[in-house]
Image (cartoon, grey):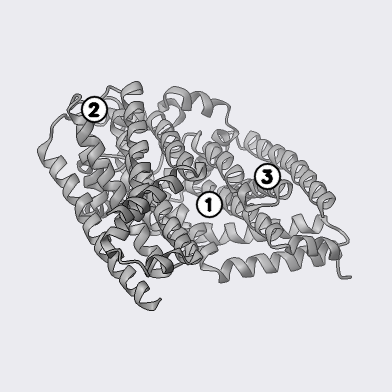
Amino acid sequence: MSRGSFTSVARGLAWRNVHNWFTNPALIVPSILFPMFFFTAFAGGLSRVDSIPGFTYDANYTTWIYGFVLLQASTFGGVFTGFSVARDFESGFSRRLMLGAKNRGGIIAGYWISALVRSVTTITVVTIVALIAGLELNGGGIDLVGLYVLALLVNAFAMLFGTGVAMRLRTMQAGPLIQTPAFLLLFLAPVWVPYDLLTGWVQAAASVNPITLVIDTERGFLVGDPTKVLPAFLVVLLLISVSLLWARGGLRSAERAA
Amino acid sequence: MSQVLLLAQRSVVRTLRQPAMVFPSVFFPLLLLSINSSGLDSATLLPGFPTDSYFQFAIAIPFIQGALFSAMSAGTNVANDIETGFLNRLSLTPLRRLSLMLGQLTGIVALGLIQAATFLLVGIAFGDGLAAGPGGVPVLILLSLTISLAFGCIGAWVALRTGNGEAVQGVFPLFFAALFLSSMSLPRDLIETDWFRTVATWNPVSYMLEGIRSLFITGWDAEALALGFACAAGVAAIAITAASMALRTRMVRT
């Protein structure tokens, strides 16, 4: 394996990012705390919501909210990796990296691996807390595999989108442009109540939001009765394909600027 | 006094001329309000829910979220003054610490005023207005400014203790936790989870929310308003004292 090859670049970059994330409290703490806040606030503060007439779900409200927080943790694992990309450009690291990397596709792969590690860590912490708080995992082994694979695919989509933005703008000022669309995609879905109980413009937005399909399938996996599994996976794979092209375009833009 | 006014003027101009400070602190709370009020409108069907419009219930949240943003702005401004040496130069003047602190925080109060006026107008335009009537407007503004001042002082205290803008940003999740672990989403008596209801009951943010909420939903609720003002003023007093002490320590160091 030569220096600058796809594998060595991906591995080196992933190691650097993962190491930075685990050793810098300013990076790891918000990544883990934010999903925890959402989980605690929604599962604890809104637990009575499952008594609303028309709210039907085969598990408790903690499980309902876990389906959302799982997606949130995976999405923001990707989003925060976009921030790392922007920071690497600001510090000049990416410029030096590009000089040394013969195959620059390895750069995106390296960031993807670090996004994956971040998300798996956050999801693990959130899951442990959720289990303590009463999470009901009624799905079988295959459901759980589907649950987490789908979440990690969403992570890949978010990371590719964030990386594409960060590589085009190459500044930390890109933060809101990475974070806001991800935030809106997540929250314009049936977060607290089923789709039928949403009202107003949020219901209209949820009807065309692909995350609605994904979140419904995730909640189905949790109770062992997944619906629309194939469409959900196809939608996420389509999002990944589009965002891969977006990230590749970002890389080309960064190369031209380097 | 003229020096305090100069400081206050500088603080106001510096805060308001930064769109990155003003815009998110108004826009994001309104965006969240819009999403929450549509997403959770069915919660009004719960027996005992105090109003039939979740928007009317949730309109109190932007006032607190705006104040949290103010805390970050105040902290960042003070940290910037420390990092650039401006505070060191001020320490050579005969200004009293409390005056210096209040002068520094005037910008945050001005930002709080813009936020409160915007949120109030949104509440009137898209909700059922103030149940307390026109007389509730000055009370609401006063409560809102007290809350902004309280959180602003906490931000300033963190900045003075650490002298670092990054540390101020790092405290943001804690502020958010204080909001999330309150009666933000449901009235306390409708919170089913025991530990959460206990935390929300001990959390002063719940009473700040309920004070503002009472003006929109109930009208004149003396108990809710008294608790709201007491909590906001109490937090402000503690935070100003702590910030003032931190300022003394920092000035001794210089």
Disc 3 and disc 1: Cα gap in Å?
Answer: 16 Å
Q: Nearer the viewer, mark 3 or mark 1?
A: 3
Residue that mark 1 sits on: A73
Which amino acid is tagged 3?
Phe
x 36%, y 59%: residue: B156
Residue that mark 3 sits on: A161
x 48%, y 43%: residue: B17
x 18%, y 46%: residue: B229
Q: Secondary structure at mark 3?
A: helix
Disc 1 and disc 2: Cα gap in Å?
Answer: 33 Å
Disc 2 and disc 3: Cα gap in Å?
Answer: 41 Å
Expressed as whole percent of the image width and height from the top left, the position of residue A116 reads 64, 57
Q: Chain of mark 2?
A: B
Quarter of the figure with the C terminus of chain B: bottom left
Please give left or right for residue B188 compared with residue B77 in the image. left
Q: Is residue A91 above or below residue B233?
A: below
Which amino acid is tagged 1?
Ala
Q: Are marks 3 and 1 in contact (CB under 8 Å)?
A: no
Residue that mark 2 sits on: B51
Indicate which disc, 3 or 1, sits on the residue closer to the N terminus: 1
